[in-house]
């Protein structure tokens, strides 16, 4: 199925008022386990990056802009350049950000990551659930390496090949549908393959971990997959979906919390942080 149209419709309803848009961000942060992992990783990296100067961040594929808001709200030194190929997404995020105290610290631009026009340099590149949509991923990683400052980091969050996006369950349930998320160009990344592609671009993997282990996979089905399937059938199910969340939400959030505390040997998600090697010190 295609679930971007469902998210787009929800976003269109929420953009009518800043409070609704903040609620939309809060829902994305709570329901989607990837946000739990990404926010934790960003906090860790920001604590290691300089605090005596602005820290420049490229949000590569900003989508609705929730990570821009997270960065600007929590890190006064952050300066964010947010890009996406979808002009409507950028317009919504930009309209909201203009109504916040953070507008002067962010710039939005329409850009294709395979032809990335920005020059940088950036201290951090954030790519959250973007690379599974792009066939020419190695070109994108080359661009990330180009715009990163020596010593800078890139964080890539993506489905893994261990059943990312519910692909294995979908094949079992609907022989013929390749993935729950129909917009993806690949079912997921192999951990070693992703690390090697980053290395070929000149980025040294610093940390790799599986996300959406047993707890997270259960939370995904409970909090995202089943409600999205209902709304995909008909928006008339919306009142029932809201009622469904009354018992499902606390259970799903508890499962999310368990997943981020676990060391997953495997998982349907993959989070890889890589670093551009620092510039060589000049010879004495």
Image: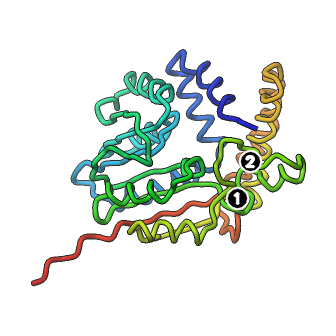
Determine whether, in the image, residue 233 is placed left or right of residue 208. right
Quadrant in the picture for residue 265: bottom right
Q: Is residue 43 visible?
A: no
In the rendered structure, the answer to whether residue 5 lies left or right of residue 206 reads right
Where is residue 252 drawn, in percent x and y? Answer: 75, 46
Residues marked 2 and 1 touching at CB (< 8 Å): yes
Q: Is residue 280 above or below residue 151?
A: below
The residue that appears at 31% across and 44% down in the rendered structure is 118
Q: Residue 234 appears in which quarter of the rendering?
A: top right
Q: Give the crowd class for mark 2: few <14, some 14-19, many >=20 residues within 10 Å.
A: many
Residue pointed to by mark 2: 220
Can you say whether 80 is above or below 10 in the image?
Answer: below
- Image quarter (top left, top right, bottom left or bottom right) of the C terminus: bottom left
- Residue beneath label 1, please? 268
Circle 1 — which element?
loop
Up-down relation of residue 123 to residue 95 (above or below): below
In the orientation shown, which residue stands out farthest toward the top? 16
Give how far across and how far down residue 184 sits, in percent. 65, 47
Q: Nearer the viewer, mark 2 or mark 1?
A: 1
Q: Is residue 11 left or right of residue 250?
A: left
The numbered disc on residue 164 is: none
Q: Which circle's residue, 2 or 1, is located before the other in the chain? A: 2
Could you say whether the residue bearing mark 2 is in a helix, strand or loop? helix
For disc 1, the neighbor class at 10 Å (few under 14, some 14 to 19, many from 20) is many
Mark 2–mark 1 Cα distance, whole angstroms, equals 10 Å
Q: Give how far across and how far down residue 45 sits, in percent.
A: 41, 59
């Amino acid at each position: 199925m295609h679930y971007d149209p469902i998210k787009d419709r929800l976003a269109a309803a929420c953009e009518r008022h800043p409070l609704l848009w903040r609620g939309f961000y809060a829902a994305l942060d709570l329901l989607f386990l990837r946000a739990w992992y990404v926010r934790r990783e960003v906090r860790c990296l920001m604590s290691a990056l300089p605090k005596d100067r602005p820290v420049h961040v490229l949000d590569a594929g900003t989508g609705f802009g929730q990570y821009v808001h997270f960065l600007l709200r929590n890190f006064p030194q952050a300066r964010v350049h947010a890009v996406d190929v979808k002009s409507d997404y950028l317009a919504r995020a930009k309209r909201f950000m203009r109504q916040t105290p953070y507008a002067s610290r962010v710039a939005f631009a329409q850009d294709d990551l395979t032809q990335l026009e920005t020059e940088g340099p950036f201290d951090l590149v954030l790519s959250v659930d973007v690379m599974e949509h792009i066939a020419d991923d190695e070109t994108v990683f080359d661009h990330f390496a180009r715009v990163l400052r020596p010593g800078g980091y890139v964080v890539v969050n993506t489905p893994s090949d261990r059943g990312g996006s519910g692909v294995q369950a979908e094949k079992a349930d609907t022989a013929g549908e390749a993935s729950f998320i129909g917009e993806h160009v690949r079912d997921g990344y192999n951990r070693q393959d992703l690390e090697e592609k980053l290395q070929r671009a000149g980025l040294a993997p610093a940390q790799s971990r599986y996300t959406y282990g047993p707890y997270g996979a259960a939370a995904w089905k409970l909090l995202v997959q089943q409600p999205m399937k209902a709304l995909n059938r008909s928006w008339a199910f919306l009142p029932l979906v809201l009622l469904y969340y009354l018992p499902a939400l606390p259970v799903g959030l508890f499962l999310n919390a368990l997943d981020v505390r676990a060391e997953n040997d495997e998982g349907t998600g993959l989070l890889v942080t890589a670093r551009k090697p620092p510039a060589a010190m000049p010879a004495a």
